[in-house]
DNA sequence: GCTAGCGTGACACTCGGTGTCACATCCGGC
DNA sequence: GCCGGATGTGACACCGAGTGTCACGCTAGC
């Protein structure tokens, strides 16, 4: 699937294709554009007295929703991204910018939008990690597993103190 | 800094340089090779009754140690990686393979090496996330902040239940 | 109608990366 | 001592990605 193939498939010249997307990977990853803003907005919309972890979990429903609307397409896209090293790398890089965005939204919720704590950054990153793990399992199961349940399970694994079952969580 | 530059700087031909490293990025990222194995081994060496989160934190000391031995070099390398999008992407991709390795080590500790749970995978990923956040802050401070303290803080933010200060952690 | 701006296509060019061929060296077996 | 393979190296040729530049055609405004 060379650039010329993509361009001619899209009915434009190679130059135009590159002018639009900048990069071949970006053409695929454009499907994810704006997700960070949507999740951050959802986060800000959560009740102020809700704890960070619950708010993050609920905010991710906006992402999950898109997978629920169009499972086949989402499965194909996700699989393509995970299986193509270059795409995978670019996607991770893009997702890296989600973390500060979510952390900032958490800081706003906490009433201190100017200072983002390490804890908020870590929690934002951990939430994204949970999302990725859940998506991994979901794609590995060909979409048969319940994505919501997987995400809940992933979040629960960190919610009760990050310790394992070998040292049961405090209280 | 083209491939020819690097090759001639290394005193070999372009072909040989590529034969060694495979990729320009790999030449830089080779500095991190084997870290996953070292961390996983350190993890397996932790006492069996230690909870996952503590074991992960201690296992990461092997990584931290390298930063402590040679702070200037580590700072330069880390900064180079973070500031070069292509390098950053490749590094994230490589680090992605650390997660299953650590998760498997956790499973071995738990006595069920054949079945890795979602929780173990999530915790391994979260620990790596903590490492990255700590390293981000450390490089941003030009290495002036205490890396160990940063990592401890990051781990603590998830250890006490992932909830925020709005749901105060049991200390 | 003329011009300024904009989208598009057609190049030329650089660079990263792969594959192939040739040569040179080393090393064990007869 | 010689030979044959294995290995390391360099010199290409080649392809695809990405950038920059130029020319053309369109539409809008004076």
Image: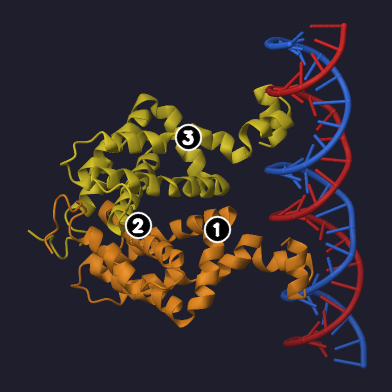
Chain colours: A yellow, B orange, C red, D blue
Q: Is residue A12 above or below residue B86?
A: above
Mark 1 or 2: the one toward you: 1
Residue at the left extreme of this rendering: A171
Q: Are marks 1 and 2 on the same chain?
A: yes
Q: Where is residue B46 shown, x and y percent of the image?
A: 27, 76
Q: Nearer the viewer, residue C13 or D14?
A: C13
Mark 1 or 3: the one toward you: 1
**Real-space Cα separation, disc 1 to disc 2, in angstroms:** 22 Å
Give the SS element for disc 3: loop
Residue depicted at 33% across the width and 68% down the height: B150
Disc 3 packing (10 Å; few <14; some 14–19; many ≥20): few
Quadrant assignment, res B153: bottom left
Q: Is residue B30 left or right of residue A8?
A: left
Which badge, 1 or 2, is on the more N-terminal residue? 1
> Dot 3 falls on which chain?
A
**Real-space Cα separation, disc 2 to disc 3, in angstroms:** 24 Å
Q: Where is residue D19 shown, x and y percent of the image?
A: 72, 43
Residue depicted at 31% across the width and 46% down the height: A113
Q: Is residue A105 left or right of residue C17?
A: left
Q: Is residue B115 visible?
A: no
> Dot 2 falls on which chain?
B
Q: Where is residue B72 shown, x and y percent of the image?
A: 52, 77
Q: Is residue D29 left or right of residue C24?
A: left
Mark 2 or 3: the one toward you: 3
Q: Is residue A146 above or below residue B9?
A: above
* Image quadrant occupied by the N terminus of chain A: top right
From the image, tell me which residue sits under label 2.
B125
From the image, tell me which residue sits under label 1.
B83
Q: Are marks 2 and 3 on the same chain?
A: no
**Real-space Cα separation, disc 1 to disc 3, in angstroms:** 22 Å
Q: Is residue A156 visible?
A: yes
From the image, tell me which residue sits under label 3.
A33
């Amino acid at each position: 699937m060379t650039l010329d193939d993509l361009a001619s498939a899209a009915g434009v010249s190679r130059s135009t294709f590159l002018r639009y997307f900048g990069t071949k990977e970006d053409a695929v990853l454009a499907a994810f554009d704006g997700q960070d803003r949507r999740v951050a907005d959802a986060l800000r919309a959560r009740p102020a007295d809700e704890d960070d972890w619950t708010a993050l979990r609920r905010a991710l429903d906006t992402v999950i929703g898109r997978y629920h609307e169009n499972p086949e397409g989402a499965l194909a896209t996700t699989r393509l991204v995970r299986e193509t090293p270059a795409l995978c790398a670019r996607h991770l890089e893009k997702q890296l910018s989600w973390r500060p965005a979510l952390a900032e939204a958490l800081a706003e919720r906490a009433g201190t939008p100017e200072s983002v704590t390490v804890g908020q950054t870590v929690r934002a990153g951990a939430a994204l990690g949970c999302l990725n793990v859940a998506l991994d399992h979901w794609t590995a199961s060909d979409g048969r597993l319940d994505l919501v349940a997987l995400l809940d399970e992933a979040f629960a694994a960190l919610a009760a103190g990050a310790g394992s079952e070998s040292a049961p969580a405090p209280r």
